[in-house]
């Protein structure tokens, strides 16, 4: 069985501060991992993806994520958060039969000015 | 513009009244799926389709039906809706059933079943 855990339901950071959102996964083979962002009233937008190779991947809007196989983690980071980054973030694993997609429960990011 | 289009965006209806949520994509994607999003539960897959006339159950298929008669369309059918199906629904598509393909999502349909 595959699973994704996002331990933080809600995070608040100040604008300009750094950000790290945690994601842990469980999967028996090489995972394909994604981070999506959901702004209020919107669908999900892909931020970045990891398939193989370089464990540090760059995404849109200045986000990056690091895949650590030994820790089964795929944490999302941003050096300096902007107020427009306030949204809900979902970590996602794709694998298994028929490319089953499993989402974490999401982390809601609040940015204070 | 590449997109996944869902209709309606919002619907309030009553228990037992059949409804259909349409989903259409213009990217010639083979793989399509439906999810429901509930607070604290993230997104859970309801049904998916690998291609035309090929559909299968996801994690929470009870109370839902789907069909895939054309490549671009993947409607979600609630034959007899119940209040526990009140949720935010997303349709998504991707290029193929390969694990390295990210999914493109529609803007969502908020259903309220009274």
Image (cartoon, rainbow, N blue to C red):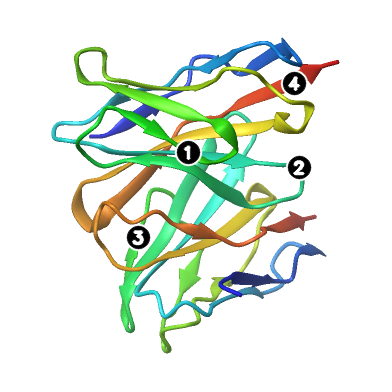
**Disc 3 to disc 2, C-alpha distance:** 28 Å
Q: Is residue A54 depicted above or below A70 in this figure?
A: below
Residue drawn 57% across the image and 49% down it: A45
In the rendered structure, are the residues bearing label 4 and label 2 in contact, judged by CB atoms less than 8 Å apart? no
- Tell me: B49 left or right of A17: left
- Tell me: A56 left or right of B106: left
Q: Is residue B81 depicted above or below B25 in this figure?
A: above
Residue A73 appears at what percent x and percent y? 33, 19
Residue under label 3, please give it: B57
Q: Quadrant of the N terminus of chain A?
A: top left
In the rendered structure, are the residues bearing label 1 and label 4 in contact, judged by CB atoms less than 8 Å apart? no
Which one is closest to the eye, mark 1 or mark 2?
1
Secondary structure at badge 2 equals loop
Residue drawn 28% across the image and 52% down it: B100
Residue under label 1, please give it: A59
What numbered label is drawn on residue A110?
A: 4
What numbered label is drawn on residue A40?
A: 2
């Amino acid at each position: 069985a595959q699973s994704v855990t996002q331990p933080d339901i809600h995070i608040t950071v100040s604008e300009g501060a750094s950000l790290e959102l945690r994601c842990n996964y469980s999967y028996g083979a090489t995972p394909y991992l994604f981070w999506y962002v959901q702004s209020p009233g919107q669908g999900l937008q892909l931020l970045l993806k990891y398939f193989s190779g370089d464990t540090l991947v760059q995404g849109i809007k200045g986000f990056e994520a690091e895949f650590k196989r030994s820790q089964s983690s795929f944490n999302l980071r941003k050096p300096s958060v902007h107020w427009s980054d306030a949204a809900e973030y979902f970590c996602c694993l794709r694998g298994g039969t028929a490319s089953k997609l499993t989402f974490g429960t999401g982390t809601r990011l609040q940015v204070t000015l | 513009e590449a997109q996944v289009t869902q209709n309606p965006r919002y619907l309030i209806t009553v228990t037992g009244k059949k409804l259909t949520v349409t989903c259409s994509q213009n990217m010639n994607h083979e793989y399509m799926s439906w999810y429901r999003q509930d607070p604290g539960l993230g997104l859970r897959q309801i049904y998916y389709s690998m291609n035309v006339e090929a559909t299968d159950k996801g994690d929470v298929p009870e109370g839902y039906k789907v069909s895939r008669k054309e490549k671009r369309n993947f409607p979600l059918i609630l034959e007899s809706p119940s209040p526990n199906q009140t949720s935010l629904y997303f349709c998504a598509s991707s290029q193929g059933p390969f694990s390295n393909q990210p999914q493109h999502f529609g803007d969502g349909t908020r259903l309220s079943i009274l």
